[in-house]
Amino acid sequence: MTRIALNALPTFVAVAQTQNLRAAAEQLSLTHSAVSQQIGTLEERLGFKLFDRRGRRVVLNAAGEALLGSVAPALQRIQEGVQAATVTARGAGQQLRITIIPSFANRWFLPRMGRWRERHPDITLEIEASQQLVDLARDGFHAGIRTGLGPWPGLVAERLYDGPSPFVAVGSPVMARRLAGLPAEAIAREPLLGDREAWARWFAAAGIAADPVTVASFNDIGLMLQATEQGLGLAVVRELFAADALQSGVLVKLSEVSFVLDRVSVHSLVYPPGLKDWPPMQALRAWLRAEFELSEKALQVRSAR
């Protein structure tokens, strides 16, 4: 039986995924020569090559593909087991580390933290708001709330709401009063914020021939809504995302016209499979779903008025 150094296997996976020794070295915090030596030693002990060298790239050959198919899932299961064992060993006082995009954290998650503390006073949430897509296991997070359709390899992904979420036009109360009673075409003459394509879809849904020009765009929806609340312009936004502002009256829906995008990004809770039955993760899943249901019901009640 061929004996190989197990510490070479994560290096093998990193090189296979990056197809570059230097990139793998940076990912593993090793030197380029150390990565090259580990791959060379692994191939020597196996007695056959795993990669074809193509300039600066290293590409898996058939033997390498076969090995990766077994090694990568095995390493993932080991990582999940270590993480599950770690959180189990911490006992009753649990800490749950979550990564969330800033707009979702500010506009939806944080306003509901009070109800989380009431239901789960023994589970501390450590939240990091970031636009970066992080590696949960590598960066020490238990879960993430991500925007997108995925897939996210090696992670369980659960959509946080299943129904359609229409996009609507919103504005501050002052701007809404100024537009009250005017035809929808009047909106096209106002300063528009955000994504031009979203406005084009809204005008198309309203049956209006318009070539919208936006005065400002944002990489964060929370900033766009803040600008809208301050009366700097009008915005098209997912109604569920603006539910709290609409409920409080800080924002006003300008029209019943809306549109739905089936392909649009959705919010999903992602986490390693090994944490599926961890009590804090179960609590987080149940709480998130309950809060989204409350948001949807509040919108339905408001729409029925």
Image (cartoon, grey):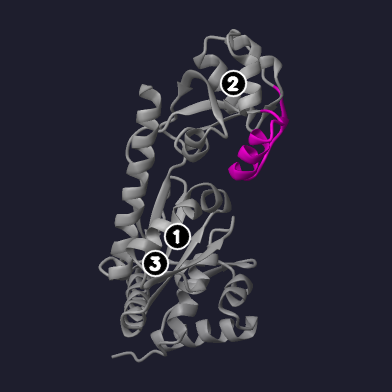
Q: Amino acid at mark 3?
A: Glu
Alpha-carbon distance for marks 1 and 3?
30 Å
Q: Is residue 137 above or below residue 197?
A: below
Q: CA distance from mark 2 to mark 1?
A: 32 Å
Q: Which of marks 3 and 1 precedes in the sequence? A: 3
The residue to which callout 2 is attached is: 200
Foreground: 223 or 12? 223
Numbered range of the magenta stretch: 213-233
Lower sequence index among marks 2 and 1: 1
Q: Secondary structure at mark 3?
A: helix
Q: Which label is found at residue 144?
A: 1
Helix, strand or loop under label 2: helix
Look at label 2 and name its amino acid.
Answer: Ala
In percent of width and height, residue 257 lies at: 48, 18
Q: Residue at x 34, y 42 (%)?
A: 294
SS at circle 1: strand
